[in-house]
Image (cartoon, grey):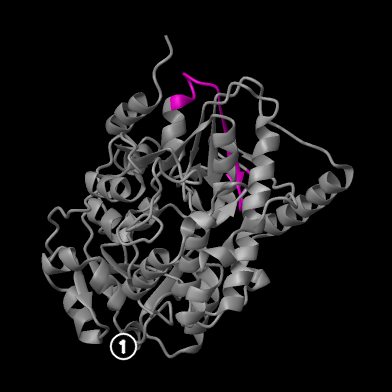
């Protein structure tokens, strides 16, 4: 099932179901259901991979053991732990997968929220947390881990049967048992996020804002729900250019008046096109719910690492290809397609591949290691997703991907992109037709031609602007300066 078919299925289900009947914690629960449907349908045709223990860092394993032990003690003793300072006005809910390295610095940076935090930390009392199992211990801007304590037995979905949802799934031959399992997990994640947030806020009456990203994760929606109960506003900071055609941002057909309570109050967007998509889907009659602040990470990165040329010409290989990997989703069955393998079987002394793992894809390494058993003549390496993307881009002069929005960040650096497969043909139709990105169905000749052709690096409709000044102007509009 490709992306268009996934979006069409979700739209038809939404139109056929009474979404107002579906509630969780007294609120419209459709955003969680829609998120679960997307996860289910996007991987419907792909075999589930078991996660290897080797995919986790030693620190992650230690932290997971420690977190599970702490959660069991808290549940047993019924403690309500809060490590939020009493004078905190703004908190940042960071994601473990957004923590990246900058060459020359041991501590990690959050590529999404650190630029925002750096503008607010001197004027407001701020505190940063990392959700999920953190990969690292040290951060450039101090961050605490926010452990989830446990779900309240009273937090559960209501009205699923009356909504007609399960009947609709059966009609569309969607695996009901698998859907129910994913929804139960989402219900648990939401509940744990909600209870953890309530415990976090209980001793603090000065909280005004939460900044987060990837709002559609059920755990994050739990924090959003608790924040709204406490009168705290939630701001989503865009983390990728993927919202075009992404069903958690795109083409919501039944947004209630006033919007969804599980969605953020305001979205900080990279450009006007992304802003327009969000406004049309989530406004519910609300105004000023988006602010265009650009993508400030590139300029923020330059404060810590000088970038002069996108490629060091003294490197051994004249053609260095950054290949940004995507986990098998939609119609994609493999991370590395056959035509790339065929290309690498030839002795190409001037070509080098860097396979960059997606930060959320824990099994990418296993597929890359299988390359060692093939008779490949072209040199390659792989890097983890926690290496900063700008760092990866400075060491390449070509970019290849199935459909990653890294193509737009490569464009900022003047690096051409070759896309492949049906998903990118749909997602980037305008850019492909304009010659901004190259595309192939999947053949060796297209890759060979890509490496020797002149490339059009003109601005696209999704072109990103990296500007700390634009970010500051956007923040000033959202949070008034203290007198």
136 in relation to 435, above or below: above
Q: Is residue 33 left or right of residue 201?
A: left
Residue 114 in sight in this render: yes
Examine the image and state in which quarter residue 200 appears.
top right
Q: Is residue 390 left or right of residue 103?
A: left
* Quadrant where the C terminus is found in the figure: top left
Q: In the displayed image of the protein, which residue is found farthest to the bottom?
A: 375
Q: In the displayed image of the protein, which residue is found farthest to the front?
A: 162
Q: Is residue 372 left or right of residue 9?
A: right
Image coordinates of residue 112 in percent, x first then y, are 43, 44
What residue is shown with label 1? 346
Q: Which residue appears at 54% of the width and 35% of the height? A: 228
Q: Which is the main secondary structure of the residues drawn in magenta?
A: loop
Image coordinates of residue 184 in percent, x first then y, are 65, 64
184 in relation to 257, above or below: below
Residue 451 in sight in this render: no
């Amino acid at each position: 099932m490709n992306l268009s078919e996934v979006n069409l299925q979700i739209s038809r289900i939404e139109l056929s179901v009474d979404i107002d009947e579906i509630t969780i914690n007294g609120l419209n629960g459709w955003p969680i259901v829609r998120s679960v449907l997307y996860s289910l349908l996007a991987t419907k045709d792909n075999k589930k991979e078991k996660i290897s223990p080797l995919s986790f860092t030693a620190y992650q394993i230690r932290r997971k053991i420690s977190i599970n032990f702490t959660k069991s003690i808290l549940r047993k003793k019924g403690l309500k732990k809060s490590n939020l300072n009493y004078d905190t006005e703004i908190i940042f809910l960071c994601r473990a997968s957004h923590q990246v390295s900058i060459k020359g610095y041991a501590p990690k940076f959050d590529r999404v929220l650190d630029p925002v935090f750096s503008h607010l930390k001197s004027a407001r009392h701020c505190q940063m947390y990392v959700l999920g199992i953190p990969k690292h211990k040290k951060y450039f801007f101090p961050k605490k881990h926010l452990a989830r304590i446990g779900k309240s037995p009273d937090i559960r979905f209501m009205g699923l049967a009356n909504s007609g949802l399960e009947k609709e799934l059966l009609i569309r031959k969607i695996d009901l048992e698998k859907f129910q399992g994913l929804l139960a997990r989402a219900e648990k994640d939401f509940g744990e996020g909600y209870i953890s947030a309530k415990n976090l806020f209980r001793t603090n009456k000065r909280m005004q804002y939460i900044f987060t990203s990837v709002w559609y994760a059920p755990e994050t929606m739990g924090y959003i729900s608790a924040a709204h109960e406490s009168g705290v506003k939630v701001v989503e900071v865009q983390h990728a250019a993927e919202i075009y055609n992404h069903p958690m941002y795109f083409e919501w057909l039944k947004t209630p008046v006033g919007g969804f309570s599980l969605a953020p109050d305001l979205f900080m967007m990279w450009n006007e096109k992304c802003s327009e998509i969000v406004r049309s889907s989530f406004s519910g009659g609300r105004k000023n719910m988006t602010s265009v602040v650009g993508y400030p990470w590139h300029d923020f990165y330059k404060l810590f690492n000088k970038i002069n040329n996108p490629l060091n010409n003294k490197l051994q290989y004249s053609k260095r290809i950054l290949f940004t990997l995507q986990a098998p989703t939609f119609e994609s069955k493999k991370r590395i397609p056959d035509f790339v393998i065929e290309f690498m079987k030839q002795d190409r002394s001037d070509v080098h591949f860097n396979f960059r793992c997606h930060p959320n894809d824990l099994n990418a390494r296993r597929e890359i290691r299988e390359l060692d058993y093939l008779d490949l003549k072209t040199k390659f390496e792989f890097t983890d997703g926690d290496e900063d993307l700008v760092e990866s881009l400075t060491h390449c002069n070509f970019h290849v991907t199935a459909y990653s929005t890294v193509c737009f960040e490569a464009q900022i650096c003047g690096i051409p992109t070759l896309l492949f497969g049906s998903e990118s043909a749909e997602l980037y139709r305008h850019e492909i037709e304009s010659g901004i990105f190259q595309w192939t169905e999947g053949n060796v000749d297209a890759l060979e031609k890509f490496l020797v052709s002149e490339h059009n690096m003109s601005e696209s409709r999704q072109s990103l602007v990296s500007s700390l000044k634009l970010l500051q102007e956007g923040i000033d509009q959202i949070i008034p300066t203290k007198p």
